[in-house]
Every structure is written in C-alpha cells, then in structure tokens.
Amino acid sequence: GAADRRFRDFHDGVIGIPGVRLHQPVEANSVFAALAPGLIELLQRDWSFHVWDDQEQLVRWMTAFDTGTGDVDGFVASVREHASAVLA
C-alpha cells in the first residue's frame, strides 16, 4: 500500500548518503542507521527519532501509515544537507 511505498522511498533515499550507514537488515517500517558524529544533534533540531545506541551513534527511523511523500522527501533532504555540513 501507500505506507509501504513511503517506506521504500525513505529507505532508498538515505542509501548512499555519506555519513549514513544502514546497520541492520530493513524490516517493516524501520531503518537502523549509524550516523556520523554530530549528525544526530543537527537532525533532531527539526525531526523526532529514537537514538538506539549513543556510543555507536545508532538511530532508529520509522515511517507510519500517515507518513506522506512530503515528509519523506523533506527528511531525506535534511539528512543530505546536514551530512554534507558535518563531513565538510
């Protein structure tokens, strides 16, 4: 359904972003990713997500049935922008 498409868009959008490494196999609507130092703090200024492991900079990103295309596109753009800033 639509939720599955949004999740796939989200997953595909974050793959290959420098400073973002997918950590575990993708299941259902959650992505576990290890992030470059400093990236979590920048992203959490505008987005809400769970830090799974502070030491490993591991986060859990999730989509829901009401996650829209704009939400996915906006988040992926934010990850790209902040990752570029942190790694510059």
Image (cartoon, rainbow, N blue to C red):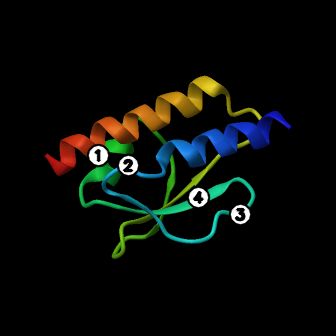
| Mark whose residue sits in front, 3 or 2 | 2
The residue that disc 1 covers is 83
**Where does label 3 land, which residue?**
27
For image coordinates 39% across by 44% down, the residue present is 44
- Where residue 55 sits: x, y (%)? 33, 76
In the figure, is residue 84 to the left or right of 2? left
Kindly report the distance in space between the C-alpha atoms of the residues bearing marks 3 and 2: 20 Å
Q: Mark 2 — residue?
A: 17
Q: Nearer the viewer, mark 1 or mark 2?
A: 2
How much space separates mark 3 and mark 4, taking CA atoms? 7 Å
Q: Of tags 2 and 4, which is closer to the observer?
A: 2
Image check: 10 left or right of 8?
left
Which residue carries the number 4 mark?
A: 31
Marks 3 and 2, the one that precedes in the sequence: 2
Q: Earlier in the sequence, mark 3 or mark 1?
A: 3
Q: Which residue, as the protein is rendered here, is positioned at the far right?
A: 1
Label 1–label 2 contact, CB within 8 A: yes
Q: Secondary structure at mark 2?
A: loop
x and y percentages locating residue 16 in the rendered image? 42, 52
Q: Report if the CB atoms under discs 3 and 2 are less than 8 Å apart.
A: no
Q: What kind of residue is marked 2? A: Ile
What's the CA distance linking mark 3 and mark 1? Answer: 24 Å
Q: Quadrant of the N terminus?
A: top right
* Residue type for callout 3: Glu
